[in-house]
Amino acid sequence: MSQDQIAVTGKPAVPAATSASAASAGFGAFVRRNQIVEHIVLLLGVLLMMGPIAVAFTTSTHDPVTIHSEGMQLGFGNNFLPTYEAVIFEQTGFTKQVTGWGMSLNSLILGLGFAIGKIIVSMLAAYAIVYFRFPLGTLCFWIIFSTLLLPLEVRILPSYEVVQGLGLLNSYTGLILPLIASATGTFFFRQFFKSVPNELLEAARIDGAGPFRFFWDILVPLSRTMIAAIFIIMFVVGWNQYLWPILMTTDESFYTVVRGIRQILQVWIGADIPAYNEALGLAIIAMIPPVLIVIIFQRMFIKGLVESEK
Amino acid sequence: MHKAQFQSPIFPYLLLLPQMAIVAIFFLWPSAEAVRSSFFLQDPFFGNETFVGIDNYTDAVTRSDYGRAAWFTFLFTLVVTVFSLGIALLLAVAADNVLRGQGPYKTLLMWVYAIAPPVAGLIGIMLFDQHIGPIVDFVALFGWEMRVGVNYWDSGIAMMIVATWKQIPVNFIFFLSGLQSIPKGVREAASIDNPSPSGRFWTIIFPLLAPTSFFLMIINITYAFFETFGIVDVMLKGEPGNNPVTLVYKVFLDGFRGNDLGGSSAQSVILMVFVLALTIIQFRLIERRVHYT
Protein backbone atom coordinates (compact mmCIF):
# COMPACT_ATOMS: atom_id res chain seq x y z
CA MET A 1 0.00 0.00 0.00
CA SER A 2 2.75 2.45 0.92
CA GLN A 3 4.44 1.89 -2.43
CA ASP A 4 1.22 2.74 -4.26
CA GLN A 5 0.90 5.99 -2.38
CA ILE A 6 4.39 7.08 -3.28
CA ALA A 7 3.79 6.26 -6.92
CA VAL A 8 0.47 8.05 -7.09
CA THR A 9 1.39 11.20 -5.23
CA GLY A 10 4.71 11.41 -6.99
CA LYS A 11 6.53 11.85 -3.73
CA PRO A 12 10.20 11.16 -4.36
CA ALA A 13 11.66 8.29 -2.44
CA VAL A 14 14.21 9.31 0.18
CA PRO A 15 17.49 9.80 -1.71
CA ALA A 16 20.08 7.39 -0.48
CA ALA A 17 22.85 9.97 -0.09
CA THR A 18 24.51 8.34 2.84
CA SER A 19 24.43 4.75 3.88
CA ALA A 20 23.07 5.76 7.29
CA SER A 21 19.97 7.47 5.92
CA ALA A 22 19.46 4.60 3.50
CA ALA A 23 19.50 2.21 6.38
CA SER A 24 17.01 4.28 8.37
CA ALA A 25 14.70 4.62 5.36
CA GLY A 26 14.95 0.88 4.94
CA PHE A 27 14.05 0.38 8.57
CA GLY A 28 11.11 2.78 8.31
CA ALA A 29 9.81 0.94 5.29
CA PHE A 30 10.29 -2.35 7.07
CA VAL A 31 8.31 -1.07 10.05
CA ARG A 32 5.54 0.18 7.79
CA ARG A 33 5.39 -2.84 5.50
CA ASN A 34 5.18 -5.27 8.38
CA GLN A 35 2.81 -3.01 10.32
CA ILE A 36 5.07 -3.17 13.35
CA VAL A 37 3.36 -0.21 15.04
CA GLU A 38 -0.07 -1.78 14.67
CA HIS A 39 1.15 -5.07 16.05
CA ILE A 40 2.78 -3.40 19.04
CA VAL A 41 -0.43 -1.48 19.81
CA LEU A 42 -2.50 -4.65 19.50
CA LEU A 43 -0.12 -6.72 21.62
CA LEU A 44 -0.21 -4.08 24.35
CA GLY A 45 -4.00 -4.14 24.09
CA VAL A 46 -4.04 -7.91 24.46
CA LEU A 47 -1.73 -7.62 27.47
CA LEU A 48 -4.06 -5.02 29.01
CA MET A 49 -7.19 -7.12 28.48
CA MET A 50 -5.76 -10.57 29.23
CA GLY A 51 -3.18 -9.72 31.90
CA PRO A 52 -5.59 -9.31 34.81
CA ILE A 53 -7.40 -12.55 33.96
CA ALA A 54 -4.15 -14.47 33.55
CA VAL A 55 -2.81 -13.23 36.90
CA ALA A 56 -6.14 -14.01 38.56
CA PHE A 57 -6.00 -17.56 37.25
CA THR A 58 -2.36 -18.27 38.11
CA THR A 59 -2.79 -16.76 41.57
CA SER A 60 -5.78 -19.00 42.19
CA THR A 61 -3.50 -22.04 41.78
CA HIS A 62 -1.42 -21.06 44.84
CA ASP A 63 -2.20 -21.51 48.51
CA PRO A 64 -3.39 -18.52 50.58
CA VAL A 65 -0.20 -18.34 52.68
CA THR A 66 2.02 -17.95 49.61
CA ILE A 67 -0.32 -15.34 48.14
CA HIS A 68 -0.50 -13.45 51.41
CA SER A 69 3.26 -13.30 51.91
CA GLU A 70 4.42 -12.93 48.31
CA GLY A 71 1.53 -11.17 46.56
CA MET A 72 -0.27 -12.24 43.39
CA GLN A 73 1.60 -14.86 41.41
CA LEU A 74 2.52 -14.97 37.74
CA GLY A 75 3.61 -18.59 37.69
CA PHE A 76 1.45 -21.66 37.93
CA GLY A 77 1.25 -23.01 41.50
CA ASN A 78 0.64 -26.50 42.82
CA ASN A 79 -2.62 -25.79 44.59
CA PHE A 80 -4.85 -25.99 41.51
CA LEU A 81 -6.82 -29.07 42.48
CA PRO A 82 -7.38 -28.18 46.16
CA THR A 83 -8.53 -24.65 45.25
CA TYR A 84 -11.01 -25.69 42.61
CA GLU A 85 -12.21 -28.70 44.53
CA ALA A 86 -13.01 -26.40 47.45
CA VAL A 87 -14.67 -23.78 45.26
CA ILE A 88 -16.82 -26.25 43.34
CA PHE A 89 -17.71 -28.85 45.95
CA GLU A 90 -17.10 -27.49 49.44
CA GLN A 91 -20.27 -26.46 51.17
CA THR A 92 -20.12 -22.88 52.32
CA GLY A 93 -22.42 -20.12 53.45
CA PHE A 94 -24.36 -19.77 56.68
CA THR A 95 -26.44 -22.84 56.01
CA LYS A 96 -23.48 -24.87 54.75
CA GLN A 97 -25.51 -25.94 51.76
CA VAL A 98 -24.06 -23.81 48.98
CA THR A 99 -21.48 -25.17 46.58
CA GLY A 100 -19.96 -23.60 43.50
CA TRP A 101 -21.63 -26.35 41.52
CA GLY A 102 -25.06 -25.57 42.95
CA MET A 103 -24.63 -21.86 42.32
CA SER A 104 -23.56 -22.56 38.73
CA LEU A 105 -26.73 -24.57 38.18
CA ASN A 106 -28.79 -21.62 39.43
CA SER A 107 -26.87 -19.33 37.07
CA LEU A 108 -27.59 -21.73 34.22
CA ILE A 109 -31.31 -21.69 35.05
CA LEU A 110 -31.27 -17.89 35.20
CA GLY A 111 -29.30 -17.55 31.95
CA LEU A 112 -31.39 -20.07 30.01
CA GLY A 113 -34.71 -19.00 31.53
CA PHE A 114 -34.00 -15.36 30.83
CA ALA A 115 -32.80 -15.95 27.24
CA ILE A 116 -35.55 -18.41 26.24
CA GLY A 117 -38.31 -16.53 28.06
CA LYS A 118 -37.29 -13.25 26.52
CA ILE A 119 -37.09 -14.69 23.00
CA ILE A 120 -40.55 -16.31 23.19
CA VAL A 121 -42.28 -13.34 24.79
CA SER A 122 -40.70 -10.77 22.51
CA MET A 123 -41.16 -12.75 19.26
CA LEU A 124 -44.87 -13.13 19.95
CA ALA A 125 -45.25 -9.46 20.79
CA ALA A 126 -43.25 -8.33 17.77
CA TYR A 127 -45.31 -10.62 15.51
CA ALA A 128 -48.53 -9.04 16.74
CA ILE A 129 -47.16 -5.52 16.32
CA VAL A 130 -45.79 -6.00 12.80
CA TYR A 131 -48.30 -8.36 11.21
CA PHE A 132 -51.66 -7.36 12.68
CA ARG A 133 -53.81 -4.30 12.45
CA PHE A 134 -55.87 -3.90 15.61
CA PRO A 135 -57.28 -0.99 17.61
CA LEU A 136 -54.90 -0.96 20.57
CA GLY A 137 -51.79 -1.88 18.58
CA THR A 138 -50.13 1.53 18.67
CA LEU A 139 -50.86 2.00 22.36
CA CYS A 140 -49.34 -1.40 23.20
CA PHE A 141 -46.30 -0.54 21.12
CA TRP A 142 -45.69 2.68 23.04
CA ILE A 143 -46.18 1.02 26.39
CA ILE A 144 -43.63 -1.65 25.51
CA PHE A 145 -41.36 1.03 24.14
CA SER A 146 -41.48 2.95 27.44
CA THR A 147 -39.66 0.10 29.22
CA LEU A 148 -36.50 1.10 27.39
CA LEU A 149 -36.58 4.40 29.23
CA LEU A 150 -36.16 3.11 32.75
CA PRO A 151 -33.61 0.45 33.57
CA LEU A 152 -34.27 -1.86 36.49
CA GLU A 153 -31.54 -0.12 38.49
CA VAL A 154 -33.61 3.05 38.93
CA ARG A 155 -36.73 1.30 40.14
CA ILE A 156 -35.23 -1.45 42.29
CA LEU A 157 -37.00 -0.63 45.53
CA PRO A 158 -40.58 -0.58 44.18
CA SER A 159 -39.82 -3.61 41.99
CA TYR A 160 -38.64 -5.44 45.06
CA GLU A 161 -41.84 -4.53 46.90
CA VAL A 162 -44.02 -5.72 44.02
CA VAL A 163 -42.22 -9.05 43.83
CA GLN A 164 -42.37 -9.38 47.60
CA GLY A 165 -46.09 -8.62 47.55
CA LEU A 166 -46.63 -11.38 45.01
CA GLY A 167 -44.73 -13.82 47.23
CA LEU A 168 -42.08 -14.41 44.59
CA LEU A 169 -38.96 -13.72 46.67
CA ASN A 170 -36.56 -16.67 46.52
CA SER A 171 -38.08 -18.23 43.43
CA TYR A 172 -36.88 -18.64 39.88
CA THR A 173 -40.02 -16.89 38.62
CA GLY A 174 -39.30 -13.82 40.70
CA LEU A 175 -35.69 -13.92 39.58
CA ILE A 176 -36.40 -14.17 35.86
CA LEU A 177 -39.71 -12.45 35.02
CA PRO A 178 -38.91 -8.87 36.14
CA LEU A 179 -35.72 -8.99 34.08
CA ILE A 180 -37.74 -9.92 30.97
CA ALA A 181 -39.81 -6.73 31.28
CA SER A 182 -37.33 -4.69 29.24
CA ALA A 183 -38.30 -4.53 25.58
CA THR A 184 -34.91 -4.84 23.87
CA GLY A 185 -35.82 -8.23 22.38
CA THR A 186 -39.17 -7.00 21.08
CA PHE A 187 -37.47 -4.17 19.23
CA PHE A 188 -34.87 -6.45 17.81
CA PHE A 189 -37.49 -8.83 16.35
CA ARG A 190 -39.69 -5.95 15.23
CA GLN A 191 -36.85 -4.60 13.13
CA PHE A 192 -36.16 -8.03 11.69
CA PHE A 193 -39.80 -8.83 10.87
CA LYS A 194 -40.11 -5.49 9.12
CA SER A 195 -37.25 -6.48 6.82
CA VAL A 196 -38.98 -9.72 5.77
CA PRO A 197 -40.35 -9.26 2.22
CA ASN A 198 -44.12 -8.73 1.92
CA GLU A 199 -44.33 -11.26 -0.90
CA LEU A 200 -43.76 -14.09 1.57
CA LEU A 201 -46.91 -13.26 3.47
CA GLU A 202 -48.92 -12.82 0.27
CA ALA A 203 -47.69 -16.15 -1.10
CA ALA A 204 -48.46 -17.87 2.20
CA ARG A 205 -51.96 -16.41 2.19
CA ILE A 206 -52.62 -17.62 -1.34
CA ASP A 207 -51.59 -21.08 -0.16
CA GLY A 208 -54.19 -20.75 2.56
CA ALA A 209 -51.86 -20.32 5.56
CA GLY A 210 -53.40 -18.60 8.58
CA PRO A 211 -51.55 -16.40 11.06
CA PHE A 212 -50.41 -19.34 13.15
CA ARG A 213 -49.10 -21.39 10.19
CA PHE A 214 -47.31 -18.37 8.77
CA PHE A 215 -45.58 -17.68 12.07
CA TRP A 216 -44.55 -21.24 12.79
CA ASP A 217 -43.71 -22.51 9.28
CA ILE A 218 -42.21 -19.39 7.72
CA LEU A 219 -41.27 -16.67 10.18
CA VAL A 220 -39.64 -18.82 12.87
CA PRO A 221 -37.42 -20.76 10.42
CA LEU A 222 -36.46 -17.47 8.74
CA SER A 223 -35.46 -15.98 12.09
CA ARG A 224 -33.16 -18.85 13.07
CA THR A 225 -29.86 -16.96 12.95
CA MET A 226 -31.44 -13.94 14.61
CA ILE A 227 -32.79 -16.14 17.39
CA ALA A 228 -29.38 -17.71 17.89
CA ALA A 229 -27.63 -14.34 17.98
CA ILE A 230 -30.05 -12.85 20.50
CA PHE A 231 -29.94 -16.06 22.55
CA ILE A 232 -26.16 -15.77 22.98
CA ILE A 233 -26.36 -12.14 24.11
CA MET A 234 -29.27 -12.73 26.45
CA PHE A 235 -27.70 -15.81 28.00
CA VAL A 236 -24.59 -13.79 28.86
CA VAL A 237 -26.72 -10.92 30.20
CA GLY A 238 -28.82 -13.31 32.28
CA TRP A 239 -25.85 -15.26 33.66
CA ASN A 240 -24.14 -11.99 34.65
CA GLN A 241 -27.09 -10.49 36.58
CA TYR A 242 -26.00 -9.17 39.96
CA LEU A 243 -28.17 -6.43 41.47
CA TRP A 244 -31.51 -8.18 41.07
CA PRO A 245 -30.33 -11.53 42.48
CA ILE A 246 -28.82 -9.69 45.46
CA LEU A 247 -32.22 -8.23 46.34
CA MET A 248 -34.31 -11.23 45.39
CA THR A 249 -32.46 -14.14 46.91
CA THR A 250 -31.97 -14.29 50.63
CA ASP A 251 -32.23 -18.08 50.61
CA GLU A 252 -28.76 -19.35 49.79
CA SER A 253 -30.05 -22.28 47.76
CA PHE A 254 -31.11 -19.75 45.11
CA TYR A 255 -27.73 -18.02 44.92
CA THR A 256 -26.22 -17.68 41.46
CA VAL A 257 -22.48 -17.86 41.04
CA VAL A 258 -22.23 -14.11 40.28
CA ARG A 259 -24.31 -13.45 43.40
CA GLY A 260 -21.85 -15.73 45.21
CA ILE A 261 -19.06 -13.27 44.40
CA ARG A 262 -20.59 -10.89 46.94
CA GLN A 263 -20.75 -13.66 49.49
CA ILE A 264 -17.12 -14.64 49.05
CA LEU A 265 -16.08 -11.12 50.02
CA GLN A 266 -16.63 -12.47 53.51
CA VAL A 267 -13.19 -14.10 53.21
CA TRP A 268 -11.76 -10.74 54.25
CA ILE A 269 -13.84 -10.49 57.35
CA GLY A 270 -12.42 -12.06 60.46
CA ALA A 271 -9.76 -14.10 58.71
CA ASP A 272 -6.05 -13.67 59.40
CA ILE A 273 -5.21 -14.88 55.94
CA PRO A 274 -8.11 -14.51 53.50
CA ALA A 275 -8.69 -17.38 51.08
CA TYR A 276 -7.63 -15.29 48.09
CA ASN A 277 -7.24 -18.41 45.98
CA GLU A 278 -10.85 -19.47 46.50
CA ALA A 279 -12.21 -15.99 45.79
CA LEU A 280 -10.27 -15.86 42.52
CA GLY A 281 -11.22 -19.46 41.74
CA LEU A 282 -14.90 -18.54 42.06
CA ALA A 283 -14.31 -15.55 39.75
CA ILE A 284 -12.80 -17.91 37.16
CA ILE A 285 -15.71 -20.36 37.50
CA ALA A 286 -18.19 -17.49 37.12
CA MET A 287 -16.62 -16.31 33.87
CA ILE A 288 -16.04 -19.63 32.09
CA PRO A 289 -19.54 -20.38 30.68
CA PRO A 290 -20.33 -16.92 29.24
CA VAL A 291 -16.77 -16.49 27.95
CA LEU A 292 -16.83 -19.89 26.22
CA ILE A 293 -20.15 -19.11 24.56
CA VAL A 294 -18.94 -15.74 23.33
CA ILE A 295 -15.72 -17.20 21.94
CA ILE A 296 -17.31 -20.23 20.29
CA PHE A 297 -20.15 -18.28 18.71
CA GLN A 298 -18.10 -15.14 18.14
CA ARG A 299 -19.52 -14.26 14.73
CA MET A 300 -23.12 -14.67 15.81
CA PHE A 301 -22.44 -12.83 19.04
CA ILE A 302 -21.00 -9.80 17.22
CA LYS A 303 -23.86 -9.84 14.74
CA GLY A 304 -26.42 -9.95 17.53
CA LEU A 305 -24.71 -7.21 19.50
CA VAL A 306 -24.27 -4.81 16.61
CA GLU A 307 -27.75 -5.45 15.17
CA SER A 308 -29.66 -5.34 18.42
CA GLU A 309 -28.18 -2.05 19.58
CA LYS A 310 -29.15 -0.25 16.38
CA MET B 1 -43.15 0.56 3.55
CA HIS B 2 -46.64 -0.83 3.79
CA LYS B 3 -46.73 -4.26 5.32
CA ALA B 4 -49.46 -6.71 4.42
CA GLN B 5 -51.34 -7.54 7.58
CA PHE B 6 -53.70 -10.05 9.11
CA GLN B 7 -57.07 -9.12 10.53
CA SER B 8 -58.21 -10.94 13.61
CA PRO B 9 -60.26 -9.78 16.57
CA ILE B 10 -58.53 -11.75 19.37
CA PHE B 11 -55.33 -13.35 18.10
CA PRO B 12 -53.04 -10.27 18.31
CA TYR B 13 -54.11 -9.64 21.91
CA LEU B 14 -53.26 -13.22 22.81
CA LEU B 15 -49.82 -12.77 21.25
CA LEU B 16 -49.25 -9.57 23.19
CA LEU B 17 -50.63 -10.89 26.46
CA PRO B 18 -47.40 -12.31 27.97
CA GLN B 19 -45.35 -9.22 27.19
CA MET B 20 -48.02 -6.77 28.31
CA ALA B 21 -48.65 -8.69 31.54
CA ILE B 22 -44.95 -8.70 32.44
CA VAL B 23 -44.58 -5.03 31.53
CA ALA B 24 -47.64 -4.05 33.55
CA ILE B 25 -46.73 -6.01 36.68
CA PHE B 26 -42.97 -5.61 36.75
CA PHE B 27 -42.51 -2.28 35.02
CA LEU B 28 -45.52 0.04 35.03
CA TRP B 29 -46.62 -0.74 38.56
CA PRO B 30 -43.18 -0.33 40.20
CA SER B 31 -42.42 2.79 38.16
CA ALA B 32 -45.68 4.42 39.19
CA GLU B 33 -45.00 3.34 42.75
CA ALA B 34 -41.56 4.99 42.65
CA VAL B 35 -43.07 8.27 41.49
CA ARG B 36 -45.87 8.08 44.06
CA SER B 37 -43.72 7.23 47.08
CA SER B 38 -41.28 9.99 46.20
CA PHE B 39 -43.95 12.42 47.42
CA PHE B 40 -44.54 10.67 50.74
CA LEU B 41 -42.68 10.23 53.99
CA GLN B 42 -42.84 6.63 55.17
CA ASP B 43 -42.61 5.45 58.70
CA PRO B 44 -40.53 2.28 58.55
CA PHE B 45 -41.96 0.91 61.81
CA PHE B 46 -45.68 1.52 61.53
CA GLY B 47 -46.06 1.69 57.77
CA ASN B 48 -48.11 4.89 57.68
CA GLU B 49 -47.37 7.59 55.16
CA THR B 50 -47.60 11.36 55.13
CA PHE B 51 -47.80 13.44 51.98
CA VAL B 52 -44.83 15.80 51.96
CA GLY B 53 -44.91 17.25 48.43
CA ILE B 54 -41.47 17.80 47.01
CA ASP B 55 -39.70 17.68 50.38
CA ASN B 56 -38.03 14.38 49.53
CA TYR B 57 -36.55 15.95 46.41
CA THR B 58 -35.25 19.05 48.14
CA ASP B 59 -33.90 16.93 51.01
CA ALA B 60 -32.20 14.50 48.67
CA VAL B 61 -30.64 17.12 46.44
CA THR B 62 -29.48 19.49 49.16
CA ARG B 63 -27.81 16.84 51.32
CA SER B 64 -24.05 17.10 51.08
CA ASP B 65 -23.52 13.39 50.44
CA TYR B 66 -25.83 13.60 47.42
CA GLY B 67 -23.80 16.42 45.95
CA ARG B 68 -20.64 14.45 46.60
CA ALA B 69 -22.05 11.33 44.92
CA ALA B 70 -23.31 13.38 41.96
CA TRP B 71 -19.90 15.00 41.50
CA PHE B 72 -18.15 11.63 41.72
CA THR B 73 -20.62 10.07 39.27
CA PHE B 74 -19.95 12.88 36.83
CA LEU B 75 -16.17 12.44 37.01
CA PHE B 76 -16.46 8.66 36.96
CA THR B 77 -18.66 8.76 33.85
CA LEU B 78 -16.38 11.24 32.12
CA VAL B 79 -13.20 9.25 32.79
CA VAL B 80 -14.72 5.87 31.92
CA THR B 81 -16.30 7.16 28.70
CA VAL B 82 -13.26 9.06 27.44
CA PHE B 83 -10.68 6.40 28.23
CA SER B 84 -12.63 3.33 27.20
CA LEU B 85 -13.66 4.99 23.92
CA GLY B 86 -10.14 6.27 23.25
CA ILE B 87 -8.34 3.00 23.94
CA ALA B 88 -10.97 1.00 22.03
CA LEU B 89 -10.72 3.30 19.01
CA LEU B 90 -6.92 3.00 18.96
CA LEU B 91 -7.14 -0.79 19.12
CA ALA B 92 -9.90 -0.95 16.50
CA VAL B 93 -7.92 1.17 14.04
CA ALA B 94 -4.85 -1.01 14.57
CA ALA B 95 -6.88 -4.21 14.20
CA ASP B 96 -8.54 -2.87 11.07
CA ASN B 97 -5.14 -2.10 9.51
CA VAL B 98 -3.27 -5.34 10.13
CA LEU B 99 -3.35 -7.96 7.44
CA ARG B 100 -2.14 -10.86 9.50
CA GLY B 101 -3.54 -12.06 12.81
CA GLN B 102 -6.71 -9.98 12.78
CA GLY B 103 -8.88 -12.90 13.88
CA PRO B 104 -6.91 -13.84 17.01
CA TYR B 105 -6.47 -10.20 18.05
CA LYS B 106 -10.18 -9.63 17.70
CA THR B 107 -11.05 -12.65 19.84
CA LEU B 108 -8.51 -11.81 22.53
CA LEU B 109 -9.60 -8.19 22.72
CA MET B 110 -13.34 -8.78 22.87
CA TRP B 111 -13.97 -11.68 25.20
CA VAL B 112 -13.74 -9.66 28.39
CA TYR B 113 -17.22 -8.50 27.33
CA ALA B 114 -18.60 -11.76 28.72
CA ILE B 115 -17.23 -11.16 32.22
CA ALA B 116 -19.76 -9.88 34.75
CA PRO B 117 -18.98 -6.47 36.31
CA PRO B 118 -18.79 -7.86 39.87
CA VAL B 119 -16.34 -10.53 38.69
CA ALA B 120 -14.20 -7.79 37.15
CA GLY B 121 -14.56 -5.93 40.46
CA LEU B 122 -13.32 -8.93 42.42
CA ILE B 123 -10.21 -9.27 40.25
CA GLY B 124 -9.84 -5.50 40.59
CA ILE B 125 -9.75 -5.46 44.39
CA MET B 126 -7.15 -8.23 44.31
CA LEU B 127 -4.95 -6.23 41.94
CA PHE B 128 -5.41 -3.14 44.13
CA ASP B 129 -5.14 -5.00 47.46
CA GLN B 130 -2.94 -3.55 50.20
CA HIS B 131 -1.07 -6.80 50.79
CA ILE B 132 -1.06 -8.71 47.53
CA GLY B 133 -1.88 -6.20 44.80
CA PRO B 134 0.81 -5.80 42.12
CA ILE B 135 -0.59 -2.42 41.04
CA VAL B 136 -0.17 -1.04 44.56
CA ASP B 137 3.43 -2.30 44.54
CA PHE B 138 3.99 -0.74 41.14
CA VAL B 139 2.72 2.74 41.96
CA ALA B 140 4.65 2.62 45.25
CA LEU B 141 7.80 2.79 43.09
CA PHE B 142 6.69 6.30 42.16
CA GLY B 143 6.01 7.24 45.75
CA TRP B 144 2.23 6.86 45.55
CA GLU B 145 1.03 4.95 48.55
CA MET B 146 -2.30 3.71 47.22
CA ARG B 147 -4.84 2.73 49.87
CA VAL B 148 -7.96 1.49 48.15
CA GLY B 149 -10.90 1.21 50.52
CA VAL B 150 -9.40 3.77 52.90
CA ASN B 151 -8.54 6.81 50.81
CA TYR B 152 -11.49 8.38 48.96
CA TRP B 153 -9.72 9.12 45.68
CA ASP B 154 -7.59 5.96 45.68
CA SER B 155 -10.81 3.92 45.80
CA GLY B 156 -12.38 6.15 43.16
CA ILE B 157 -9.44 5.78 40.78
CA ALA B 158 -9.34 2.01 41.23
CA MET B 159 -13.06 1.81 40.40
CA MET B 160 -12.59 4.01 37.34
CA ILE B 161 -9.76 1.81 36.05
CA VAL B 162 -11.72 -1.42 36.46
CA ALA B 163 -14.88 0.09 34.93
CA THR B 164 -12.89 1.41 31.96
CA TRP B 165 -11.20 -1.94 31.41
CA LYS B 166 -14.51 -3.77 31.44
CA GLN B 167 -16.03 -1.44 28.84
CA ILE B 168 -13.21 -1.50 26.26
CA PRO B 169 -14.43 -4.70 24.45
CA VAL B 170 -17.93 -3.37 23.61
CA ASN B 171 -16.50 -0.14 22.23
CA PHE B 172 -13.86 -2.09 20.33
CA ILE B 173 -16.48 -4.36 18.69
CA PHE B 174 -18.60 -1.39 17.58
CA PHE B 175 -15.67 0.69 16.35
CA LEU B 176 -14.22 -2.23 14.42
CA SER B 177 -17.54 -3.06 12.80
CA GLY B 178 -17.98 0.64 12.03
CA LEU B 179 -14.54 0.79 10.41
CA GLN B 180 -15.14 -2.35 8.40
CA SER B 181 -18.39 -1.03 7.04
CA ILE B 182 -16.60 1.90 5.38
CA PRO B 183 -16.63 1.04 1.66
CA LYS B 184 -13.32 0.04 0.11
CA GLY B 185 -13.70 2.63 -2.61
CA VAL B 186 -13.84 5.44 -0.06
CA ARG B 187 -10.64 4.21 1.56
CA GLU B 188 -8.84 3.94 -1.76
CA ALA B 189 -9.92 7.41 -2.81
CA ALA B 190 -8.76 8.67 0.58
CA SER B 191 -5.35 7.11 0.21
CA ILE B 192 -4.91 8.83 -3.15
CA ASP B 193 -5.89 12.24 -1.77
CA ASN B 194 -4.00 12.02 1.45
CA PRO B 195 -0.80 10.02 1.67
CA SER B 196 -0.28 10.37 5.41
CA PRO B 197 -2.15 7.69 7.37
CA SER B 198 -2.86 9.96 10.32
CA GLY B 199 -4.13 12.79 8.10
CA ARG B 200 -6.31 10.27 6.32
CA PHE B 201 -7.70 9.05 9.60
CA TRP B 202 -8.64 12.47 11.00
CA THR B 203 -10.07 13.94 7.78
CA ILE B 204 -11.94 10.96 6.37
CA ILE B 205 -12.23 7.89 8.58
CA PHE B 206 -12.95 9.67 11.88
CA PRO B 207 -15.85 11.78 10.52
CA LEU B 208 -17.34 8.63 9.00
CA LEU B 209 -17.17 7.02 12.44
CA ALA B 210 -18.96 9.97 14.08
CA PRO B 211 -22.41 8.33 14.23
CA THR B 212 -20.88 5.23 15.85
CA SER B 213 -19.00 7.43 18.32
CA PHE B 214 -22.09 9.42 19.35
CA PHE B 215 -24.08 6.26 19.75
CA LEU B 216 -21.30 4.68 21.82
CA MET B 217 -21.06 7.77 23.97
CA ILE B 218 -24.68 7.32 25.04
CA ILE B 219 -24.12 3.61 25.62
CA ASN B 220 -21.05 4.39 27.73
CA ILE B 221 -22.80 7.01 29.82
CA THR B 222 -25.62 4.56 30.49
CA TYR B 223 -23.07 1.90 31.38
CA ALA B 224 -21.13 4.15 33.75
CA PHE B 225 -24.34 5.16 35.51
CA PHE B 226 -26.14 1.86 35.83
CA GLU B 227 -24.15 -1.21 34.92
CA THR B 228 -21.17 -0.40 37.11
CA PHE B 229 -23.22 -1.18 40.20
CA GLY B 230 -21.54 -4.59 40.52
CA ILE B 231 -18.05 -3.12 40.22
CA VAL B 232 -18.74 -0.47 42.85
CA ASP B 233 -20.42 -2.90 45.24
CA VAL B 234 -17.71 -5.54 45.08
CA MET B 235 -14.78 -3.13 45.15
CA LEU B 236 -16.19 -1.48 48.28
CA LYS B 237 -16.86 -4.95 49.68
CA GLY B 238 -20.48 -3.94 50.26
CA GLU B 239 -19.40 -1.44 52.96
CA PRO B 240 -18.92 1.98 51.35
CA GLY B 241 -18.01 3.82 54.56
CA ASN B 242 -16.19 6.96 53.52
CA ASN B 243 -15.57 5.78 49.93
CA PRO B 244 -17.02 7.29 46.76
CA VAL B 245 -20.30 5.88 45.45
CA THR B 246 -22.26 6.44 42.25
CA LEU B 247 -25.81 7.83 42.26
CA VAL B 248 -27.34 4.46 41.43
CA TYR B 249 -25.45 2.87 44.29
CA LYS B 250 -26.78 5.59 46.57
CA VAL B 251 -30.38 4.79 45.56
CA PHE B 252 -29.67 1.23 46.68
CA LEU B 253 -27.93 2.28 49.90
CA ASP B 254 -30.59 4.76 51.03
CA GLY B 255 -33.46 2.46 50.09
CA PHE B 256 -32.23 -0.85 51.43
CA ARG B 257 -29.78 0.10 54.17
CA GLY B 258 -31.07 3.50 55.24
CA ASN B 259 -34.75 2.50 54.96
CA ASP B 260 -35.41 5.92 53.50
CA LEU B 261 -38.07 4.95 50.96
CA GLY B 262 -39.19 8.44 50.03
CA GLY B 263 -35.66 9.77 49.62
CA SER B 264 -34.57 6.75 47.63
CA SER B 265 -37.63 7.02 45.37
CA ALA B 266 -37.01 10.72 44.81
CA GLN B 267 -33.45 9.91 43.73
CA SER B 268 -34.85 7.19 41.42
CA VAL B 269 -37.18 9.68 39.79
CA ILE B 270 -34.32 12.14 39.25
CA LEU B 271 -32.38 9.36 37.51
CA MET B 272 -35.46 8.44 35.47
CA VAL B 273 -35.62 11.99 34.11
CA PHE B 274 -31.93 11.77 33.28
CA VAL B 275 -32.34 8.47 31.38
CA LEU B 276 -35.37 9.89 29.58
CA ALA B 277 -33.30 12.82 28.35
CA LEU B 278 -30.50 10.50 27.22
CA THR B 279 -32.96 8.28 25.36
CA ILE B 280 -34.46 11.22 23.53
CA ILE B 281 -31.00 12.34 22.43
CA GLN B 282 -30.21 8.78 21.36
CA PHE B 283 -33.34 8.48 19.24
CA ARG B 284 -32.76 11.78 17.53
CA LEU B 285 -29.27 10.62 16.61
CA ILE B 286 -30.52 7.28 15.31
CA GLU B 287 -33.10 9.04 13.18
CA ARG B 288 -30.41 11.19 11.69
CA ARG B 289 -28.27 8.17 10.97
CA VAL B 290 -31.14 6.42 9.23
CA HIS B 291 -31.62 9.45 6.98
CA TYR B 292 -28.05 9.75 5.88
CA THR B 293 -27.03 6.15 5.31
Image (spheres, rainbow, N blue to C red):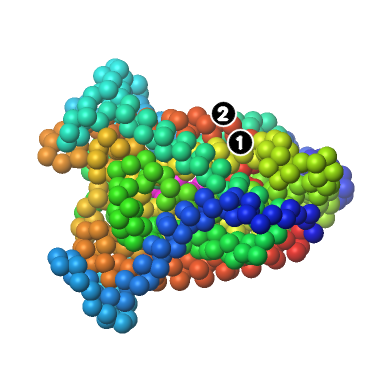
Secondary structure that dominates the magenta span:
helix
Horizontal and vertical percent for residue A278? 26, 29
Whether residue B163 appears in magenta in the rendering, the answer is yes
The answer to which of A72 and B121 lies nearer the viewer is B121
Occupied quadrant, residue B204: bottom right
Q: Which residue is mark 2?
A: A296
Tag in front: 1 or 2: 1
**CB-based contact (under 8 Å), mark 1 and mark 2:** no
Residue A308 visible within the image? no
Stretch in magenta: B162-168
A2 relative to B264 in the view: left or right: right
Q: Label 2 marks which chain's residue?
A: A
What residue lies at 55% left-to-right and 37% top-to-bottom?
A: A232
Whether residue A3 appears in magenta in the rendering, the answer is no
Q: Which residue is mark 1?
A: A228
Horizontal and vertical percent for residue A271? 13, 36
